[in-house]
Image (spheres, grey):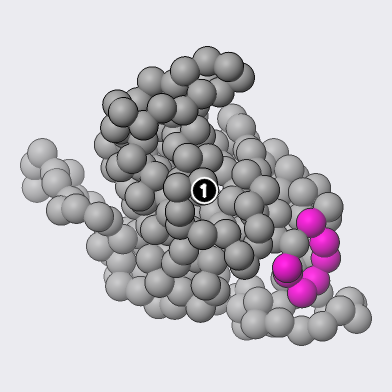
Amino acid sequence: MKLDILAFGAHPDDVELGCAGTIAKEVSLGKSVGIIDLTRGELGTRGSAEIRDTESGNAAKILNIAVRENLNFRDGFFKNNEKHQLEVIRMIRKYKPEIVLCNAIDDRHIDHGKGSKLVSDACFLSGLLKIETSLNGNIQDPWRPKLVYHYIQWKNIEPDFVVDVTGFMDIKTKAIMAYDSQFYNPKTNEPETPITSKNFLDSVKYRAQDLGRLIGVEYAEGFTAERYLAVNSLDDLI
């Protein structure tokens, strides 16, 4: 299966928090989109890996994506090394995306920056003919995505561009709240974490509102790019 867009997250819920509005919009435009989670989030304070498996599946249905897989790397301890790069390369060559979305380049959680660099490096290496990978006994062809973009997470990193996601915040919110074990729930007795407060949940919306305000729309999501952005005409800008 060839995808237009493949989004990677170090943990289940990273993609939803960072760019679910953009994904929902692209799906509505007829694009085929998939998500690859690097870990099962087993070190999360709340819930369990099994609960996160169910939640990520529910979120995938809400976003109406084509596929979601989990590479089952060790939460907190995976590395940007050959072993892990080859696993990511297999996914890139399997789905042949034109665009890859991945974690923030720098963030509070150490896995986010690691995951960002791991996926970015794998996108380059995936295009090299002499790196051989196989899937289900078949040798894979090289494939390098045309574009790699990084969504924004905990830290307020200055975006290189923003995407108007007006009309898609409800879907983004529903996809996030599919992770019922992870976010604000005044009825739970589980420990509090930086992402379980109501303020954190509200911040997803007010960040999108603020980015939208800056470009004259209701909601937007920000991304950083690895190369200069290019347009065919000044009319391409909104």
Residue 27 higher or lower than 228, as above or below: above
Residue at image location 62% in from the left, 44% down from the top:
71
Residue at image location 70% in from the left, 60% down from the top:
41
Residue extending farthest left: 233
Q: Amino acid at mark 1?
A: His
From where the camera sits, is residue 29 visible? no
Helix, strand or loop: magenta stretch:
loop
Q: Which quadrant holds residue 210?
A: bottom left
The 10 Å Cα crowd at callout 1, few under 14, some 14 to 19, many 20 or more, is some
Residue at image location 54% in from the left, 54% down from the top:
9
On the image, the x and y values in percent for residue 18 come to 50, 60
From where the camera sits, is residue 39 visible? yes
Left or right of 189 in this view: 151: left
Closest to the observer: 139 or 59? 139
Left or right of 55 in this view: 92: left
The secondary structure type at the circle numbered 1 is helix
Residue at image location 30% in from the left, 66% down from the top:
159
Is residue 116 in the magenta section? Answer: no
Closest to the observer: 12 or 25? 12
On the image, the x and y values in percent for residue 99 come to 36, 39
Is residue 47 in the magenta section? Answer: yes
Count of numbered circles in the view: 1
The residue range painted magenta reads 43-49
Left or right of 233 in this view: 121: right
Q: Which quadrant holds residue 226?
A: bottom left
Instruction: Say which residue label 1 marks.
Output: 84
